[in-house]
Every structure is written in structure tokens, then in C-alpha cells.
Amino acid sequence: MTDAADYPRTARGSNFFDTDTNLIRLLERRAGPVLEQHEGRLSEFGAWVGDALDRQAEYTDRFAPPRLDAYDLDGNRTGRIIFNPDYLACHAEAYRRGAVGLPYTAEGVGPTGAPSHAVCFTMGYMLSQADISIHCPVTMTGAVAHVLDRLAPADIRGRYLPDMVRMDGHALSGGTWATEQHGGSDVGATTTRAEARNDGYRLHGVKWFTSNAGSGLALATARPDGAAPDGRGLGCYLVPSHLADGTPNHYRTRRLKEKAGTLGLATAELDLNGAFAVEVAPPPDGLKAMMAALEYSRIHNAVGSAGLHRRAFVEAAGWATHRHAFGHPIRHYPMVQDQLLDMQMELEAGTALAFESVFAFDANLADPDDGGDWLRLVTALAKYRTAEQAVTACRQAVEIVGGNGYTAEMVTSRLYRDCLVVSLWEGPANIQALELLRLVAGKRHGDQIFLARVGTILADLPTSHHEPAVEEVADILEGAVEECRAALSYLRRNPDHGPRHGRRLLTLMADTLAASLLCEEAVAELAWGDRRKWLVASRFVRKVLGRLDPVTANIDPANAAFDAVLAYEPVD
């Protein structure tokens, strides 16, 4: 993209990879060998997402969402879910293109020799820009495959995993059945019962919120007879949609949920009426296995939130470029420019934060002995902050487009409805705060890892006074790091205060890490002779961490370079 005027009126029809300069540069910096190997695959995926998938998403959302065919001709309950053929074809195509299966092939091995999931997460980032109702089942399929690969007994892994990771268009999709009406996020309160049989288990209970309800294989939490009544008593079970003889398994759809968004996604209440299942992890490891699936899904939630944010920004920038009001394109008006720069600034921060969790995931696969504290910590921060900003960005896109942005003809309306779910999926903010507290105020040492990571970035900030506001940015960032250090030290001494302050700590640490990662990117690009990212990073540090007065502060340098910043052009 060489000029701000090149933003299309709508992103549909564009290549969601080739036009994403920020993403490509991030991958060049952090995953160069992976990008070099898979750039063609990602480009082809971006072209498909930006055209065929996006068209299907609008059609399914507006005219052909999934329906429940509850009874057969004889009045027997079937609970059969009907999808339109375009949705099914696009769903299958995502797997054929490697959105789940690539890490399980020879091509999916990273430079360390361990499987790399970076390409799959990058595909998830693009999927959500067109259809989060496809991205969600891809996410859960990836999560179930990851658990089978890493935690399931060898016979179960060998029997079921190949059908989930095949790339011939016939892969089985996955689901994660943990939520029950009385428990919500408290998965340990599961009342579904697992009855042991000679050939496996039979599950009895109700799962209250099952996304991708038409999945071929699902992980479910259940409690074997006689097991402990808390989370330690849970097992994790794999439930196929059909039995070995081809007949449907013994569970039925009560009803499909009527939701604000993700209308293309079948979300259901399921009655488990003695459903056949095999044991993936017995108590006390069942909850751990399900949490491994949720951890994987949280990374997808973060990249998906960043993807939603990117689509909202591109639609807003395109509309502002082509819409004339009062004699000028509205992107010429200073208040609109400020909105666009803020959306773009937050987009780049969110993308950096989300992909930090992606790279931490691959690093943990390459070295499982590192304990995974950084992976868990950065995932909690990324999941929280990217979701919050995605909701803000999608609302802002509707506002910039105006009345048209509120209508079903514009993708901004669907984005706004769909984005509301990313704050809830895989645990809302308070759950992420509790996860954070376990890592920084308990027996683990996530606080020290965090301080070391941001401290290294702070130490590498440029010392040249030729950069705008370099001393101010360094002082603000150093102050934020010290604020984090003081808060973490306080909670180490007073862990009982954590539940009250966890949400505030989550915000402080997420903002500080996002700012630090932007500065790290800026330093790298300064070495290339490009100041553009520095303008973005310094704006973020001053506005988010420094809370600069928007009226009395000096004009931000990014405003003066608006066209170049918006267009990802180099700034000398």
C-alpha cells in the first residue's frame, strides 16, 4: 500500500495478507524463516479470505444461518443442525488450506525442529477479518488436535488425531464442551457424569453453551462416579459425533442459541444421553487437559481480536478516504485523522501483543522445560487487551462510516455484533486477571519474567536526541515499568489483596507490555532508517501510559505525518 488514497472503499476483494504491511514486517522480524517458507501459502490464504470467505460470511449472516431440524417425519427428535452449503464449503476449505493441520506435517516444522503453529495463528488472524463464525470452529479444532497430540494416550491419539489434521478437505472439526448453566467459567463445578463401560464411557448431563455444535469430535469435561466433587475430580473425554457403525452418538441438540452476533456459528444446548466417549485424561488431570485446550484457544482469541480490529480499521480508513462531506474527503478533517491514527496505533499494539503469545507458544513447544510461565502470562494479557480494543475499534468504525455503518449492507454492522463475543470467549477479563495473579503472586515467577522482558526493551531504547520525544517516551515507559514493579512487589507481600486489584493489575501490565513491544518494533525499524513505527510507538506511550492532555499537549508528530503513517510509508 503506497498511498493513503489506495485504501479501497471496502476491504472485500483485497488480499488480506499482501496488503497487511504491519503483519508482514512483524513476521519478518520475529519469524523470518517461517515467513520465507510459507509466504506463498499465506498470500493465497489472504486472497481467499478477502473474497470467497467474506462473501460467504455476509450471505450466511444475513440470509442463511444454521437452523435446527428438531424432528423427523415420524416425530422423533433428531436434533439435526442444517448448514447452508457455502458455509460448509468454506469451513472445509479452511482446513484444506492448513489452518489446523499444517503443524502436523513435515512442512509445519519450525526452525528449531519442533512444530510451529505461527502460520495457523496467522491464518486465524485473517479468518476473523472475514468470518469469525469460521474462525471459532477452526480455533476449537486446533485446540482439540493440540490436546490429542500432546496429552492423549497413544492409542486414542493414533485413532482420532489424523482425522482432525488431514488437509484434503475432509477433516473433522472440533468442539470444547465445558460450560454448564450453573457453572459458567467455573468449570470445576461440572455435574456431567462419566459412567465407565467396558468399551469406554457414557456421558450424562447438559452442556449449556457449545459452539461449533455440529463438530465431529469434541472434548468434554465430566466427573466419573465416586470422583472428588471439585475440579480435581474431573476427567476429560473425547466425544465423536457418530459411533463406529455410522449412527449418531447419543446426544441431542435442545435448541440453538439466539445470539447478538456470530450468527453463522451453530451454538447449542446439548443433552448428553449416555453419549459414547473415550478418556483423554482421568482425574485429577482432566481439568488440566481442558485448560490446555482453552490456552490454545485464548491465543486464537487474541489474534482473532486483532484481526477484527484490523478489518474495522481498514473499513474506516477506506470509507474516510472515499466519502466526501462538506466538499472534502472526510479523512482530511483533523478529528477523523485523530480517530484513524488512534485506531491504527491500537491495532499495531494489539497485533504485537497477540503475536507475542504466538511466538511464546512455539517457543514453549520447542522447549517444554521452560515451565510455560511466560506463555500463560502473555496469553492472559493479550487475550484481555486485544478483545477490549477490538470492541472499541468496531464501534469506532461504525461511527466513522455513520448511518450506513449501522446497516446490514455494511460489514461494520456485522463486525460490531461479532466483536462482542471475543471479550467472553475463553474467559472474560476477570478470569484472565485470576490467571495473572496465579502467575505473579503465587508460587510461580511470572512477575520476574515480565519485568525482565520489558526491562530489556527499555534498555534498548534509542538514546539519540534526534528522535522526537525520545526522553519523554523513555521516562514514561520507565515510570510504567516501575509502577508494575511496585504493584507486583505489593501483591507478593499481600497476596490476599490480589482478588480486589487483579483487574487493575491486568490493565497496567497489558498496557505496559503493549507499549514496550511497540517500542521494540520501533527500534528495529529505526535501524532500517524508517521512523514511522517510532511515531506510532511514541504516540501510544504518551497517550496510553502518559495520559497526555489531548488539548494542551503539543501536536503529536504522527499527526504531521498522517498520510505516511496511515499508508505504512517510510518516514525519514
Image: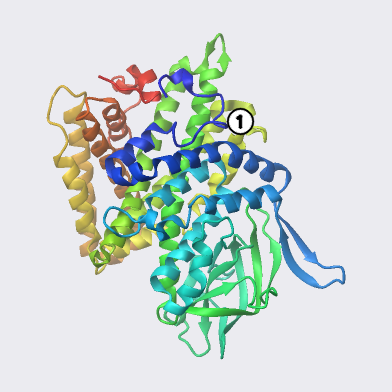
Query: Against 74, is 412 above or below?
Result: above
Residue 510 is situated, as x and y percent measured from the top left of the image, at: 33, 48
Q: On the rendered image, what quadrant is the N terminus found in?
A: top left
- Is residue 409 visible from the viewing direction of this image? yes
Residue 239 is situated, as x and y percent measured from the top left of the image, at: 57, 74
Res 62 quadrant in image: top right
Query: Against 388, is 404 above or below?
Result: above
Q: Callout 1 environment at 10 Å: few (<14), some (14 to 19), or many (20+)? A: many
The residue drawn where x is 65% and y is 66% is 269
Q: Which amino acid lies under the numbered mark 1 shown in the image of this protein?
A: Gly
- Is residue 263 visible from the viewing direction of this image? no
Query: Against 529, is 486 above or below?
Result: below
Q: Residue furthest top?
A: 327
Quick one: 460 or 473, which is closer to the camera?
A: 460
The residue drawn where x is 28% and y is 46% is 513
The figure's colour scheme reads: rainbow
Q: Residue furthest right?
A: 74
Res 200 quadrant in image: bottom right
Quick one: 297 or 470, which is closer to the camera?
A: 297
Residue 81 is situated, as x and y percent measured from the top left of the image, at: 71, 61
Residue 362 is situated, as x and y percent measured from the top left of the image, at: 32, 56
Say left or right for 450 vs 147: left
Secondary structure beneath label 1: helix
Say left or right for 164 vs 264: left
Q: On the rendered image, what quadrant is the C terminus found in?
A: top left
Q: Which residue is mark 1?
A: 405
Quick one: 355 or 287, which is closer to the camera?
A: 355
